Amino acid sequence: MIDPAIVGQVTTPRLLSCAVVTVLALTACTSGTSSDPVVGSATAGGVVGTVGGGGTGAPSSGTPTPTGLTPEAYRAELDKARGPIREALKKLDATGGKGLDERLEKTVASMEEAVAGLEALVPPPEVSTAHGDYAGALRRLVAALSAAQEDVRAQEVCTGPAVLTGVHEDGRLSPVRDSGNALADLGDYRADVVPVKVGKERSRRLSNGKYINSEGRPGRAYLELKNGNSRDAVVVLVRGKKKAIRVYVRKKSKFRIQGVRDGNYKVYYTLGTDWDSRARSFTRSCDFEQFGKSVRFRTVRTSTQIRWTDWTITLNAVKGGTVRPKRIKPGEFPG
């Protein structure tokens, strides 16, 4: 037996007030017979507080009061923002480990644009407060999703649903739903922008030695897998371009794959917490590695005997280990 081991604003333009004043200057007149001056009163004329002429009135305050949207126009603007937000959250919810960082970045960008548009609106006066609550809740959700990008890069959060669970646990989803419902009650305004069901944090596991998929195993050799880590593992055997076997090995456990076909295999494994069978990925604390060398299974028959090679691979670092693992990106893992 060979025993290699893994060391493992939009600013509203201001209209400046102006005043046009014409002043009639005082004129001192003298009489031909008197040296006493005759003084006239000062007079002033003109228009104050108007632009372009046409009337008189009180001085302007300087900034015109914006006119709110009509209910019909406001509904149209809500729908304009609602679609992209719903679509972005749907796509994020369907994202597994591969490409999660890119998908989350796109989600944040799409939602940021939509929310900025909502923040620039002047809604009908009767929904002004509800609109502010709604836009504010969305802004805080976008900020939470943006902050989650750091956890995704660190592989502490590993799937789209896990990202949404995280912001839900932080209290950022419920206010969006509640404020959207409150807005809808004021005039049939569609503001339901969270189209997916978001669950609580879970810790799902398969049984030790559970085959996620496997080809037939008619061979004589076995591959023993030892997982001394503090996290469960999924091991994938790839022969050529075929993902021949996927098997679940729980932490502090071992499992023997019997009947492995002859051939050269690349061995990949992922460690993590909470196995999502739909995404075929752990949702939290995930690592992805490849065994540092190919594993060859070969059966030799002679006239008197049949010989084959068994393998044992340790997924955690051990003293005297001879093969180092290769850390790989989530997109490189054959999940």
Image (spheres, rainbow, N blue to C red):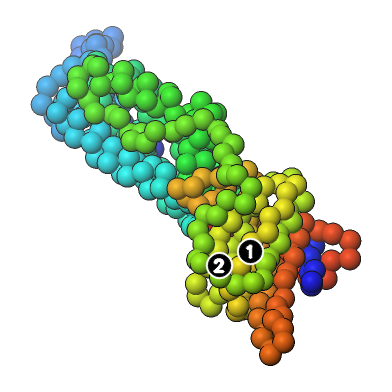
Residue at image mark 2 = 217
Task: In this rendered view, identify the residue nearer to me: 305 or 255.
Answer: 305
> As shown in the figure, which amino acid type bears the numbered disc 1?
Gln
Number of numbered discs on residues: 2
Tell me what residue is drawn at x 64 percent, y 61 percent: 257
Q: Residue 12: image x %, image y %?
A: 32, 34
Outermost residue toward the right in this view: 319
Q: Quadrant of the N terminus?
A: bottom right
Tell me what residue is drawn at x 84 percent, y 59 percent: 318
> Is the residue under label 2 in contact with that under label 1 (CB below 8 Å)?
yes
Relative to residue 230, is residue 56 depicted above or below? above
Q: Residue 53: image x %, image y %?
A: 14, 29
Task: In this rendered view, identify the residue nearer to me: 333 or 299.
Answer: 299
> As shown in the figure, which amino acid type bears the numbered disc 2?
Arg
Task: In this rendered view, identify the residue nearer to me: 244 or 287.
Answer: 244
Residue at image mark 1 = 258
Relative to residue 123, is residue 278 depicted above or below? below
Horizontal side, residue 214 vs residue 225: left or right: left
Tell me what residue is drawn at x 66 percent, y 77 percent: 297
Q: Residues within 10 Å of mark 1 (few under 14, many from 20)?
A: some
Asked which quadrant contains residue 198, the reply is top left
Task: Quote the CA–CA distance across marks 1 and 2.
Answer: 7 Å
| First in residue order: circle 1 vs circle 2 | 2
Q: Residues within 10 Å of mark 2 (few under 14, many from 20)?
A: some
Relative to residue 108, is residue 1 depicted above or below? below
Q: Residue 73: image x %, image y %?
A: 17, 31
